[in-house]
Amino acid sequence: MEKTITVLPGDGIGPEVTGATVQVLQAIEKRYNHTFNFQYALIGGAAIDACENPLPEDTIKLCSESDAILLGAVGGPKWDQNPSHLRPEKGLLAIRKHFGLYANIRPVKAIPALLEASPLKKEIAESVDLVIVRELTGGLYFAEPRKKTKDYALDSLVYTREEIERIVDTAFQLARSRRGKLASVDKANVLDSSKLWREIVEEKKQGYPDVEVEHMLVDSTAMKLITKPDAFDVIVTENMFGDILSDEASVITGSLGMLPSASTRGDGFGLYEPAHGSAPDIAGQNKANPAATILSAAMMLREAFQMETEAAAIEEAVFNVLNDGNFTSDLQVEGKRVLSTTEWTAKVLEELD
Amino acid sequence: MEKTITVLPGDGIGPEVTGATVQVLQAIEKRYNHTFNFQYALIGGAAIDACENPLPEDTIKLCSESDAILLGAVGGPKWDQNPSHLRPEKGLLAIRKHFGLYANIRPVKAIPALLEASPLKKEIAESVDLVIVRELTGGLYFAEPRKKTKDYALDSLVYTREEIERIVDTAFQLARSRRGKLASVDKANVLDSSKLWREIVEEKKQGYPDVEVEHMLVDSTAMKLITKPDAFDVIVTENMFGDILSDEASVITGSLGMLPSASTRGDGFGLYEPAHGSAPDIAGQNKANPAATILSAAMMLREAFQMETEAAAIEEAVFNVLNDGNFTSDLQVEGKRVLSTTEWTAKVLEELD
Ligand SMILES: CC(C)[C@H](C(=O)O)[C@@H](O)C(=O)O
Ligand SMILES: CC(C)[C@H](C(=O)O)[C@@H](O)C(=O)O
């Protein structure tokens, strides 16, 4: 197959982790006889520096001519004092909105070799295997009206039926392909938008009799993600709750440096990126852990290109390298071998050779 | 001193835990020669059952004639299907709003005797000592407009300068009386209300040169509460973020059954209640842990009545009983002695005798 992938390295460790990932994708290309055309474009701080726009027209054009997007990370202290239209994260918000990437999928799975690095007790973390499905283009992030004066500020939390239906369908379908359990998270005892959300989940569940649905409040979910994270299979929630809960969930197994994510819109096209940020403190030092980005590329192969075998080959390679005791410096595992980004990537490439 | 306390037992285990707490307050009365006049009123499900109103006029009247309010907990499956104006939690929201209780204070402190029950590793949980200051009468909880049809829903997130200033002042003052560190939590990279929040914190900090302030995003705070909870001293945030983060924080030390809370308005008057809920599954079985309510009463003595010695006596009594190995059944501590609510309370009363 021939596919075009737009690579957006972004800021901080972004160029290093996407660089490593492109090498892995090239190994897949060779081994499975595909053609991947890589094209590069700017986003975030790098784009602001180059052309005063966190998401240049050019980047949008290249992305829309491609089959999938691979993103590193955006942001850093350099741009922290910028006015808000010149902030790196505006690029991320704008690309989500421009391409209608309404479904953010974040799997969190315990990795035995890394459990030691988890802040949770081993018994609690070891069988975690959940996916957060976060609505990504609605709610407080984009709704109007907004207003801000020196003495007053307003944000609006709006959801339409259509926006809720499509993300709830995404989550039901995912739950059906996994253990058949869906936790729908809202704050229906306070918010009208949550009441609508809950009504729609109730309607939709008729169409998925094989999925067991539970409504949970966002505050109790924040507790249960710590006390009983292994009780979750698929979690679906609106944009802001999803932002908070997916970050919370990302640290419970000690493997933040390993977590991929996909932002999709139901037709395979999507933006694939690590769950972690741009880590400006270690940027350019050949220390970054490229695993989350490499695993995001595996998600891309599976979901955007239907390359299941190829995706599984990448995942196996990554886990073999970890199980052999090879780690990057972010992972605090006793007695580990600490490799640089390029050394660690070389091990993965060897596995795929 | 003579003080009038309105007791709102509420639902589930509420009557048992407030019952135990009134006994403790009576022991204090006797020992320190005070007069506490207890008056009882209905709230939540109990009030809905009695008069179809989760916060009856009568309750408001008694509360306004008293010096402080002691609340058990509200809610339970019995009322879960009720229309929203007949839900127990509406009583709680209404009492907060009626009395302008804008500052919710939730301390979370590791208790050595309970660390085993924490989901976190001991090294991470053992030195946690933080307070969450949550804005309680603004934001998404109460703002207009709101709207809900079959196909569309809107909630509004509004903050005025005055609302932000007073809660930020509360937090700065608290930080000053503790370790002098304040984390102000917002989502300023997305929300206009958070931008105003951050501006006001920046202005206010000029007045508290002895307090070190850090702005944090709500998503990274949700992570750090798990990975490095001992790095926090005082956390201040808006209503919805505070709801989520304070519940998250409440489980990290394994002592949810021990956590008190206060909802105040700057003049000492306030509502004191345990951080936990109504636990309908164990209601009426003499199993509930009254410690959080007893410790909430200690907060009441300290903050509403300036009775520091008396408050400290209660806290010491509770910790002595725990350190002697006496627990209620909610606490999963190896080799512990499991007591009923009344037995455990009797031990605290002995300490105060
Ligand atoms: C950078 C920020 C705007 C973004 C968000 O809040 O969505 C990030 O936290 C994320 O989760 O991808
Ligand atoms: C019952 C509910 C409305 C309430 C809230 O969200 O404020 C509760 O969760 C709390 O934190 O006291």
Image (spheres, coloured by chain):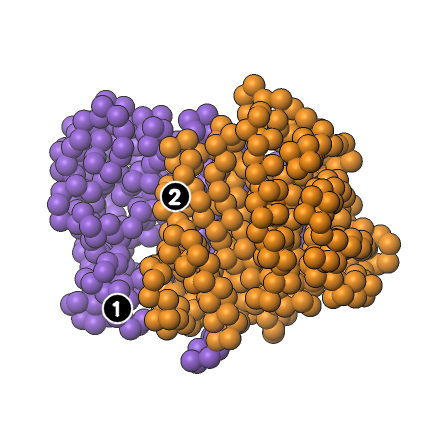
Chain colours: A orange, B purple
Work out which quarter of the rendered image holds the N terminus of chain B and state it.
top left
A50 relative position to B278: left or right: right
- Work out whether residue A6 or residue A83 is closer to the camera in this orientation and state it: A6
Which quarter of the rendering shows the C terminus of chain B?
top left
Residue A37 at x, y percent in the picture: 78, 55
Identify the residue at image location x=69%, y=43%. A31
Q: Is residue A164 visible?
A: no
- Mark in front: 2 vs 1: 2
Q: Which residue is mark 1?
A: B81
Return the residue at label 2.
Answer: A230
Q: Find numbered disc 1 in the image and state the secondary structure of the residue it sits on.
A: loop
* Tag 1 subunit: B
User: Label 2 marks which chain's residue?
Assistant: A
Outermost residue toward the right? Answer: A50
Relative to B122, residue A185 above or below: below
Q: Give how far across and how far down residue B221 sits, in percent.
A: 54, 44
Q: Amino acid at mark 1?
A: Gln
Q: Is residue A176 left or right of residue A330?
A: left
Q: Residue furthest top?
A: A335
Cα separation between marks 2 and 1 = 28 Å
Residue A295 or residue B38, whichever sits in front: A295
